[in-house]
Amino acid sequence: MKIRVMQVGPIGTNCYLLEDENTNTAAVVDPGDEADRILAQAKADGVEIVSIFLTHAHYDHTTGVAGVHKALPNVLVYLHPGDIARLGNPVFPALGTDPTPYDDGDVVKVGGIDVQVLHTPGHTPGGVCLMAGDVLFTGDTLFQGSMGRTDLPGGSYDEIMASLARLAKLPGDFQVLPGHMGMSTLSAERKSNYYMQEAMG
């Protein structure tokens, strides 16, 4: 398993290519913008994009979806139903294709990699984190030393606290790959993230 990270769009959203080197396939996590750059990176890495995974449907995580899907029309775009229901406004813009729902406990394969879906609402109603091996793509639920904002439509402080508590209770340690800012580990966030510590009670 190999992970490529790119900062895309005007606010530097973290977009990831989750690559299975055995099958030369990949999923794009949160193509927030710059679809041509994402496609070029996949080509340079020698992988075929087979899925698009969205941690939530805010525009800064989805602006590149239409461009990637136009180039690769057979690729499925996965999104939680809680955000599918909100598509079609400036905060949750339409994707240019009908998304495929995935929900808590679902496992989606990328080549030989199992990607497990954890529903973690709070930043948005349909926010998810994605677990692949010892890696946790946390979208805008958990950041290095912080968490996602809850003041936008559909946000909930109580729900994000419950989601952070759930992440804190995951067994072992994980690499934390968030939607913005730097990378971290779950162990470090348990020890030093004020919001996660509040959530842990």
Image (spheres, rainbow, N blue to C red):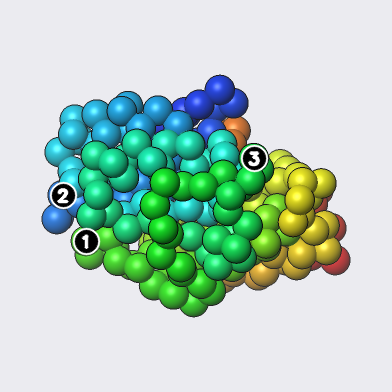
Which residue in the protein does label 2 denote? Answer: 24
Front residue of 34/115: it is 34
Mark 3 → mark 2, Cα distance in angstroms: 36 Å
Quadrant hosting residue 145: top right
Element marked by disc 3: loop
The correct choice, above or below, for 159 with respect to 9 in the image is below
Mark 2 → mark 1, Cα distance in angstroms: 8 Å
- Residue 111 marker: 1
Say if mark 3 contacts mark 1, CB within 8 Å.
no
Which residue in the protein does label 3 denote? Answer: 90
At x 57%, y 39%, the residue is 59
Say if mark 2 contacts mark 1, CB within 8 Å.
yes
The correct choice, above or below, for 7 with respect to 91 in the image is above
At x 23%, y 55%, the residue is 74
- Using the rendered image of the protein, determine whether residue 65 is visible from the camera's viewpoint: yes
Front residue of 84/125: it is 84
Q: Is residue 2 left or right of residue 137?
A: left
Mark 3 and mark 1 lie on one chain; the one further toward the N terminus is 3
Q: Position of residue 132 (x, y in %)?
A: 40, 61
Front residue of 34/96: it is 96
The correct choice, above or below, for 200 with respect to 65 in the image is below
Specify the amino acid type for callout 1.
Answer: Gly
Element marked by disc 2: loop
* Labels 3, 2: front one: 3
Q: Position of residue 73 (x, y in %)?
A: 25, 49
Specify the amino acid type for callout 2.
Answer: Asn
Q: Position of residue 155 (x, y in %)?
A: 76, 54
- The quarter of the rendered structure image containing the C terminus is bottom right
Element marked by disc 1: loop
